[in-house]
Image: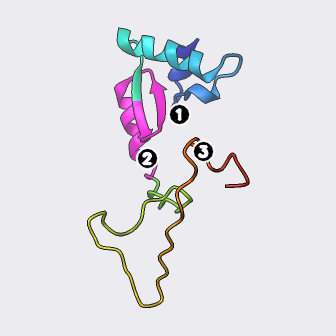
Amino acid sequence: TLESIAQTPAGFSASEVTGYSPEQVRRAAEALVAEGRLCRANVSPRRVRYFARPAQAEAYVRERPRASPQPMVAGSRAKAAWSVDEPGLITSKTRIIRATPPPRDVYRTNTYQQF
């Protein structure tokens, strides 16, 4: 049972229990936490371990060093490093091209190759 696994010094996480999906284990463990039969230890912002006693949870968190936060890698959806209110940088080499408006009935120009 989950309660017997929780009595080990390392407790358990939902992904370590075999035979059930992590979501099923998590729901059962959270129900036991709500009843007061298990306690939860937040190992990191996204990882939780379950223990039989609060002292076990505190000892586990105390012994494990916190992982240093990893900087996010800028991808195609990363925000710009400047504020929205800053004016654009326009130099003598900046080219501003204004396209002619599409015909009246064309709403999605990427669909029609001729426009």
Q: Position of residue 28 (x, y in %)?
A: 51, 12
Residue located at (52% from left, 62% from top): 74
* Real-space CA distance between mark 1 and mark 2, rounded to the nearest whole angstrom: 11 Å
26 left or right of 83 in image: right
For label 3, the residue is: 108
Q: Amino acid at mark 3?
A: Arg
For label 1, the residue is: 10
Count of numbered circles on the image: 3
Residue located at (60% from left, 23% from top): 22
Of 41 and 45, nearer the camera is 45
Of 88 and 60, nearer the camera is 88
Q: Secondary structure at mark 3?
A: loop
Instruction: Give the magenta range.
Output: 41-66
Q: Toward which corner of the image does residue 81 lie, by quadrant?
A: bottom left
Residue located at (73% from left, 53% from top): 113
- Which circle marks residue 61 in the picture? none
Q: Amino acid at mark 1?
A: Ala
Label 3: few (<14), some or many (≥20) within 10 Å? few
Asked if labels 1 and 3 touch by Cβ distance under 8 angstroms, the answer is no
Question: Between disc 3 and disc 1, whose residue precedes?
Answer: 1
For label 2, the residue is: 63
Q: Secondary structure at mark 1?
A: loop
Residue 60 is covered by the magenta coloring: yes
Label 2: few (<14), some or many (≥20) within 10 Å? few
Q: Toward which corner of the image does residue 56 lie, by quadrant?
A: top left
Q: Amino acid at mark 2?
A: Glu
Q: Secondary structure at mark 2?
A: helix
Where does the N terminus fall, quadrant-wise?
A: top right
